[in-house]
Image (tube, rainbow, N blue to C red):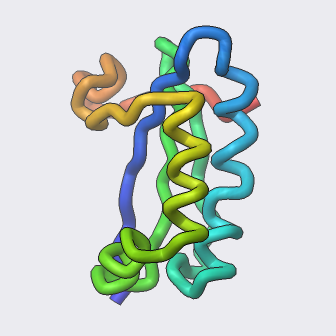
Amino acid sequence: MGRVVIACYSPKPGRESDLHELPRSHVPRLRAEGLATEREPFIAVASDGTVVEVFEWVSQEAIAAAHENASVRAMWDEYEEVCTYLPLGQLSETAGLFSEFDALP
């Protein structure tokens, strides 16, 4: 059964445009490895510039397998160059009943 996740990426200074490109290829790259479903991801931006991505892994086993996959680990290295990961709850938008975000430009 698929696992829907919400990932939050806070851009490092001066790396916003680089960060905006990575999520566009993220899920297609996971799909190429058989790890993500065909469900289209949703990508948005919080008021502080954090990119929020909602996507679906194939299964819990796929999530575990990603940690051993060289292609995925290389992709994660690309993310680490341009951002840091944040818990969703750190975004001010999550304090409201209905969290609002801007679409990724």
Q: Position of residue 27 (x, y in %)?
A: 62, 64
Q: Please state which of residues 76 and 94 is positioned toward the viewer in this rendering.
A: 76
Residue 17 located left or right of residue 67: right
Residue 5 located left or right of residue 19: left
Asked whether residue 101 appears in the rendered view, the answer is no
Kindly indicate the quadrant of the structure image that contains residue 98: top left
Q: Please state which of residues 60 and 52 is positioned toward the viewer in this rendering.
A: 60
| Quadrant that contains the N terminus | bottom left
In the image, what residue occupies the spot 59% across and 55% down? 75
Asked whether residue 5 appears in the rendered view, the answer is yes
Kindly indicate the quadrant of the structure image that contains residue 102: top right
- Number of numbered markers: 0
Q: Please state which of residues 94 and 66 is positioned toward the viewer in this rendering.
A: 66
In the image, what residue occupies the spot 40% across and 75% down? 68
* Relative vertical location of residue 85 with respect to residue 16 in this rendering, above or below: below
In the image, what residue occupies the spot 37% across and 59% down? 5
* Relative vertical location of residue 33 with respect to residue 25 in this rendering, above or below: below
Q: Position of residue 104 (x, y in %)?
A: 68, 33
Q: Position of residue 30 (x, y in %)?
A: 59, 72
Kindly indicate the quadrant of the structure image that contains residue 44: top right
| Quadrant that contains the C terminus | top right
Q: Position of residue 3 (x, y in %)?
A: 35, 74
* Relative vertical location of residue 105 with respect to residue 7 in this rendering, above or below: above
In the image, what residue occupies the spot 23% across and 31% down? 89
